[in-house]
């Protein structure tokens, strides 16, 4: 009997190994409107929060994901960037150069930005202003440090000429324990 049990142990270990090797099941978005649409998740993130939300969205909607990169990165510590180049660009409405982006093949573009000085970040403003959004669907998502999303969704609609801009997902920082559930509800409720 003891011998049989000893033989069983390796088998049980293999079964347990297989069970743990299967990645956690990510709930794909249950939104028929996304079927047959080419989807892009595009975001800018300076300290990682918006990137984290972008990746969660991407896991659920599929398609492609890329980070909107300014030609000149924002270098320096929080205070230097916040009270220096960031404030200057936002308040003057400067659209800094970004590395090339081609959105022509996408139907639905999720656009993510942190709030900077009550507005979307300058590289995201460039991305929206310089691409042709005619006939495309834009879905904003915004991370903030306590002030909320302000009017960033409306500002995005003004810049992304010709786009149908859907309701935004707004979250504090990189979210908390209820963010996954809220994200799923938001995604399932969008009308594409
Ligand atoms: C330059 C700068 C300006 C900011 N301005 C605001 C603001 O006006 N309102 C707010 O709620 N949070 C503000 N924040 C906080 C960020 O929006 C928040 O931390 C965000 O989640 C950062 O996203 P990221 O990690 O993707 O860069 C600001 C942060 C920086 C760096």
Image (spheres, rainbow, N blue to C red):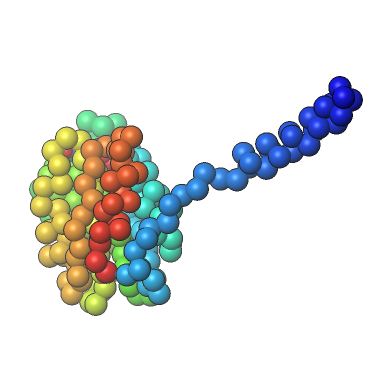
64 horizontally vs 88: left or right: right
**Res 50 quadrant in image:** top left
Placement of 86 over or under 103, stated as above or below: above
**Res 136 quadrant in image:** bottom left
Give percent across and percent down for residue 1. Answer: 87, 24
Placement of 53 over or under 128, stated as above or below: above
Q: Residue at 20%, 35% (x, y): give it.
A: 145
Could you tell me if residue 146 is visible in this image? Answer: yes
Q: Residue at 28%, 46% (x, y): give it.
A: 182
**Res 79 quadrant in image:** top left
Give percent across and percent down for residue 80. Answer: 23, 33
Q: Nearer the viewer, residue 29 or 63?
A: 29
Give percent across and percent down for residue 85. Answer: 20, 43
Q: Nearer the viewer, residue 174 or 47?
A: 174
Give percent across and percent down for residue 187. Answer: 30, 56
The residue positioned farthest toward the front in the image shown? 1
Could you tell me if residue 50 is visible in this image? Answer: no
Placement of 50 over or under 61, stated as above or below: above
The residue positioned farthest toward the top in the image shown? 2
Q: Residue at 26%, 32% (x, y): give it.
A: 78
Q: Residue at 12%, 65% (x, y): give it.
A: 158
Quadrant of the image where one finds ligand 1: top left
């Amino acid at each position: 009997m003891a011998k049989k049990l000893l033989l069983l142990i390796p088998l049980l270990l293999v079964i347990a190994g297989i069970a743990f090797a299967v990645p956690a099941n990510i709930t794909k978005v249950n939104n028929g409107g996304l079927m047959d649409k080419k989807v892009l998740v595009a975001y800018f993130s300076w300290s990682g929060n918006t990137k984290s939300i972008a990746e969660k969205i991407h896991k659920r909607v599929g398609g492609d994901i890329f980070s909107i990169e300014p030609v000149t990165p924002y270098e320096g510590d929080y205070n230097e960037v916040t009270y220096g180049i960031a404030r200057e660009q936002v308040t003057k409405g400067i659209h800094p150069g970004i590395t090339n982006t081609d959105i022509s093949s996408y139907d639905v573009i999720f656009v993510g930005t942190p709030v900077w000085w009550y507005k979307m970040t300058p590289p995201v403003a460039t991305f929206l202003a310089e691409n042709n959004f005619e006939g495309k669907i834009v879905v904003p998502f915004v991370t903030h440090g306590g002030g909320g999303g302000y009017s960033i969704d409306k500002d995005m609609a003004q810049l992304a000429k010709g786009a149908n801009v859907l309701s935004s997902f707004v979250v504090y920082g990189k979210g908390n324990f209820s963010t996954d559930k809220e994200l799923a509800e938001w995604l399932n409720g969008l009308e594409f």
